[in-house]
Image (cartoon, rainbow, N blue to C red):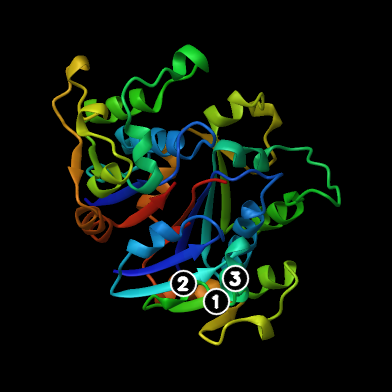
Amino acid sequence: MKLGVLMSDFRTGSDVLDRLSAEKLGIIFVGNGIYHATVKEGGKTSPILEKSATYYVLTEDLESRGFTSANVDSRIKPVTYNDMVDLIFNEYEKFIWI
Amino acid sequence: MGKLTIGCFASLVGSVSLDFTVKLAEAAVKKGHKVDLWVSGNATMLSKKGQRAFKDYSALQKTINGLLETGNFQMTACEACAEARGYHKEDTMEGCKRFSMDWYLASCFSADRVLHIGGD
Amino acid sequence: MATKRLCFVIRTLPYKIEGSRLAMTHAIASQTVEIYLEDGDLVEASVCFIADGVLNCLKNQAAMKHYGITSIEQHLKNSLLLDMKVMICKEDLEKFGISEDTIVKDAEDLGGETVAQIVPYSEIQKEMEAVDHLLFC
């Protein structure tokens, strides 16, 4: 399946994400999920970024929390709401919100 | 152009997940897609009329009114969730509907994409 | 004539938030969805419990006694009574040290015949791949 995961939290949901597999997996960090894209806890990047997936982060939610695209890990592509609509209709077939 | 059905349980005040939902719906409608928004649980309050905007709380009514005017967006509230919160039919925002939960499943039936935001 | 399959995946704990309750009540609403559809069209809902969500399946929930509300246990039984497909993740039950005899597996006391399936996560992954839409709660 082509699965898009909207990761909206920082402290919960990783256990669910760890086990998910998909032929094509996209992880979109939104809400407090953006900390996975920006924070290095104990000097380490989020373990979520080790999955075999394409990563995105919602720019608006980054900015709301005091970050910019310059703070984002290089594996992650910043996207707007417009871009998200295209991801939803063109890139992935099923979506889940964690 | 496609149809996106979004279901949301998150509250209008106390969570920004509903803000996300409305902004995504707005972006999709602007691109020419149709959007059905199902508000259930605490999200039901988004469809209540007479919301007053304060700087410390999410205020989405204006955006919702604009979306409803496009004709490519409909918002339906869970009737039981509304009644349980003391919000009755006459309190419903103009242009919004109230139905039982099976309405949402029927909307999913005809949707190209479904995004379900299961609550905070 | 078409059938669309929806899978509600419950991953959250019961009672503090409404997620698992609403997942169950929405899934059960698939029984009456035909009124909105063309003749012959159907929506089939399944429910999977994973991660913390498996704790919704414990027996002897006294939610009616203490909160005055229907327990998730009762909703689970109702869904089985309606012959809905219910899957519970075996590894997650084991992780919490929950034995099969302490969870709701059937609605026999209500006259139901369908039983909940306790399956490895890989089976739940297959279900998620097979359905048309996923609804995580």
Give the quarter of the image for residue B2. Answer: bottom left
Labels 2 and 3 share a subunit: yes
* Most foreground residue, C57 or C96: C96
Figure disc tally:
3
Q: Are marks 1 and 2 in contact (CB under 8 Å)?
A: yes
Q: Are marks 2 and 3 in contact (CB under 8 Å)?
A: no
Task: Please tell me whether residue B17 is drawn above or below residue B99 in the rendered image.
Answer: below
Residue A47 numbered tag: 2
Q: Position of residue B47 (x, y in %)?
A: 66, 41
Q: Which residue is mark 3?
A: A41
| Residue B118 seen from this side | yes
Q: Three-letter amino acid code at disc 2? A: Pro
Q: Position of residue A66 (x, y in %)?
A: 75, 71
Q: Residue at x 39, y 72 (%)?
A: A92
Farthest residue toward the right? B55
Farthest residue toward the left? C113
Q: Calculate the distance from the C-alpha at mark 3 to the C-alpha at mark 1.
A: 5 Å
Q: Residue at x 26, y 27 (%)?
A: C102
Q: Three-letter amino acid code at disc 3? A: Glu
| Residue C46 seen from this side | no
* Most foreground residue, B50 or A80: A80
Q: Which residue is mark 1?
A: A44
Labels 3 and 1 share a subunit: yes
Q: Three-letter amino acid code at disc 1? A: Lys
- Left or right: where does residue B89 sit relative to residue C47? right
Q: Residue at x 66, y 38 (%)?
A: B45
Eye-nearest disc, 2 or 3:
3
Subunit that carries the residue with mark 3: A
- Left or right: where does residue B75 sit relative to residue C101? right
